[in-house]
Amino acid sequence: MLPNTQARAPTTRIVSQSVVPRDITEEFTQAASKLKTGQLVKDEYFTLFEAVGALEVGRNHLALAHCGEIEMIIDLMDTSHKQIMDPKMDSGYLGPEEKGKGLEDDYDVLRDLVPEEVVWIMDELLCHEMAWHRGHPLSQTLFTSIYLDKLLWPIPRTFDDTHFGCGSLATEKQIPDLVHIVLRAYCLALIKCCDFVHARVTSEFYYEVSSVQIERMLLTFFELAQEEDFSTQLYNRTLLSHFEYEHFSDVLNRAISWIDEQDTIDAAVRSAIKSRLQFRQEFLSGLQQDINILETRSVDKLESCLSIIPALRESSNTSRPVPESFSWKIQRRLASTVPPRPVVKISFEDALAHLKRLCQDGIHLNQVLDYGGPYNLKVAVWTLLSRKPQPSVYIRSLIQTIIMNRSTVLGALPVKQFIYDELAALVLPSSILLEANLDETEVPSDPRFQIAQLMDGFVRRFSQPFVDTFRSACLNRCRIRRTVCHTLADWDNLQMEAEDLDEQLRTLSEEPPLELPNGDTTYSYPLSSWAYHQKLIQFRLILQLGFELTIYAPEELPGMYWYLSHICSTHLGHIDRIRTFILAAVQRDRRSLAKHATLRKSFLLFDRLTTHIVAIDAFAISLHALYVLLSRHKVLPRAFAPNAYSNDQFRYELRMKPFLQITLPELVPYEEYNREATLQGDSDEVVLERATKAIGEARKAWEATLANGPFDDFNGEKPNAPAIEEDWKRDVKDTMRACIGASIAIETVKKALVNASGAAEPLNLRVNIPEAGSKSRWHDWWAVPQVSQAQTQSTKA
Amino acid sequence: MASSTPPASENPTSTLRYIRYDSAHEDAYVAAMRQLISKDLSEPYSIYVYRYFLYQWGDLCFLAMDTDPTTGEEQMVGVVVSKLEPHRHGPMRGYIAMLAVQEEYRGKGIATKLVRMAIDAMEKGGADEIALETEITNTGAMKLYERLGFLRSKRLHRYYLNGNSAYRLVLYLKEGVGLMRTSFDPYAPPPDHAHDHLPPAPVPPAAPLLGENGA
């Protein structure tokens, strides 16, 4: 189904006070009268994008929703034309249920409210606020509140203008205290909270792009406009960003003291109101902190919010509904190209759950901030951001800024140091390439000077793509996969560039060649080796996210798990290669003890990486073999019909699309893939043995991975991040559960094969592949089938 | 995941007939089409969207019509709307924009038949590939397309106005479509920006790492 796009197209326009509307009814009617009904006047350059975004004319009027307040209603067509109009596309349309009710709401914001009604309005606003955090537009959430509307439009010039009586003849004194002092303070602070969130998200949400990527970004604009985690659209209003935080805090404080003094209000309701005001105070202050958390390391405010949540939940029954204080009709007056859409309803329980996660994630963010080397930072960032449900866009935007802002990582580390730490840990422990920069050598002919220059060039070129491998974790899961599909091609190029650099550097550093057993000689190629390592991680991520996002059809699973294991074994071979060169360097240079300590650390990191990849590899081999058996015996669910248009080879090509143009690792030709993926020539017994053996190895390797823990030693210590460590361990344990599930499935298939004694009949088995995200899936990256004896058929001898 | 239910029977009742859209009957067809589609699909479309497709690719739009045996009146019970043009100056891409079948007529293979007619017409028109998006909650549509050989190529988060995500489904009709260069290939290497001081990158297969990694 074709998506609409217009709602997402950014329309940050400023109302110009100097625009003078001119009535063009006459001219328009005259021009239009020359056309037949339905006649198309199509400009050659009128694109689908514009077609989808076009406003319709109908129902007797043309509503120029763009103009916001200045709504022009032009009578120009008779009702016979209304059939060309989809009511859902009419921005001025009111459904039959609204007949006779008019276009405006007659709710009086100056009316008296009982305290219970104030509680209800506050809770309803919180629901809308969280719905907005979850990606729904303001127009269908907060901007349906008549109270908020009154505060936001017309745009208040001074803070004193921000009251419900503004624009009417009423003075502040005529507004009931509960409304003016309490509800107003709550509403204003809520708007300011949204302002902080909006500012953070709009400054960071869109990936910072290097100039080389801009062209590509423009080209994928359609897609970007399509898919959003968050609606940044403000419909030509402001979220009071022009008023300082202190104003909002002051009105809240005043409201809190005022409510304390109201002895006439029932104690329970009074405390309900007070807890809501206090929550708002803490939340506002927590959001105001924003990236200053890098300096303060304080999460007190969010912790206070968390502690108030139970009180909010328990006191929500003290409320009395005032549904008429919200209206979807306000949308008609917003600067938007879409017609009014239904108000988004989320329950108070859901809103609190979202809020709780937001606070919790915000608190745990503190555990990412201490720098413990690139490896540990990557583990921490990816672990935190892979939480299910994924942390909210606000938290993700915050982390994205914190990872790198103005060429500084975690607000403290120059990006050059960051990338040097990574190289030192993986490919260049104790090398002149990293040390050359420390010299003051300024003689251009000195090799150290030239090395330093080349290395500076490397940092300039590679730091952004490297940092982006961290920052991409902040995108939504769908976009992570697509982004990595794109960056894969970049890294393929980067690897080639690094290889050029390696060749120049090894001449300058006089690297001695390494003799291979077959007599050939070769060199270490440290920078391109590192780039290749990065690329292989991305290959794996694309596949694993493919499983998580249910991209693969059941009949693709044998092949995709084979491919995953293929990538893993390629990676293991590559790590071995790096290790070999480092060992050779150690043997050449036995002098320095300090160097040996550095090298030992690298070897520990290699062991950690190797154990983890072996675990993934073994599990993938086992699932591959299991799926081969299920497929051979025709019990694997099928998506494709025999009379489908495409064939296996075309489908393979499509599936490998992200990898087709990658130089290394080379694309596996279809014939070879097909042989490997089906384990052609191997008997069932051999395949079964393979599955059993591999799952045993996988279980051992995952246990070893768990024992290693998430973090590597960095400068003699591991990061102190208990919450992240817990998440990481849970993830590994879930994987181990998935391994057990696979063992059971393998056993069941084994028994069925014995019973079937080699008959070509389909096995008497029922196969179910639990959906990603479901409980029986154990782990989203591992599509372990549930295999059970089919009940209905009798066992065939 | 996919169930093992067999595809719906492709023997529609005898009164059903399948026709190509004809602009001579635009008024009646478009009105009926819009009614069908607006009932079925969550996205609202303006008249311009229909016209965009029908004026340019009316020949890729197919209709299923049924005649009421008592009144003799014919009504539209199914529709598919598509387009066909080079994708980013690369492969000829067919795109299925809308597909709808009246509720009482589902399970008779009408949608499959309509999609097949559209794909056949696009193939005749030189299509290299067919693409479309579908809501991830629309398992019926996904099964239909996957039976025809489509693969999910990517997932799009919150793609539709109702906040639902989508899958992009793609079908290659020829060999080598994945390698057809588009002028804006998202997977193509970036322009030669980095070689300010270097000659163009050497031909990759000779890369020294090639023979040594993963061996």
Image (cartoon, rainbow, N blue to C red):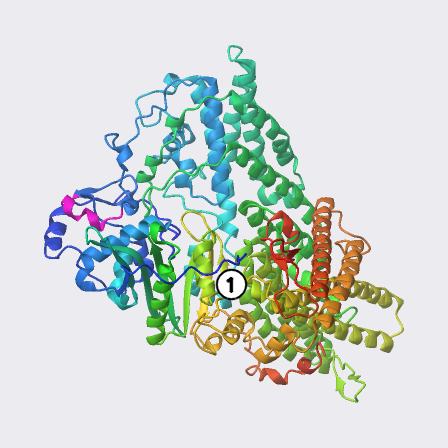
The residue nearer to you, when weighing A790 against B168, is A790
Residue on which the image places disc 1: A639
Quadrant of the frame with the C terminus of chain A: bottom right
Residue A210 drawn at (x, y percent): 52, 64
Residue A29 drawn at (x, y percent): 12, 50
Asked whether residue A129 is drawn in magenta, I would say no
The residue range painted magenta reads A75-86
Amino acid type of the residue tagged 1 in the rendering? Ala
Classed neighbour count for the residue bearing mark 1: other residues with Cα under 10 Å, few (<14), some (14–19), many (≥20): many
| Chain where mark 1 sits | A
The residue nearer to you, when weighing A725 against A161, is A725
The picture quadrant where one finds residue A365 is top right
Residue A749 drawn at (x, y percent): 69, 62
Looking at the rendered structure, the number of numbered marks drawn on it comes to 1
Q: Is residue A443 above or below residue A277?
A: below
* Left-right relation of A21 to A30: right
* Left-right relation of A733 to A282: right
Q: Is residue A438 visible?
A: no
Q: Is residue B213 visible?
A: yes
Mark 1 residue element:
loop
Question: Residue at coordinates 51% horizontally, 37% vertically from top-left?
Answer: A193
Quadrant of the frame with the N terminus of chain A: bottom left
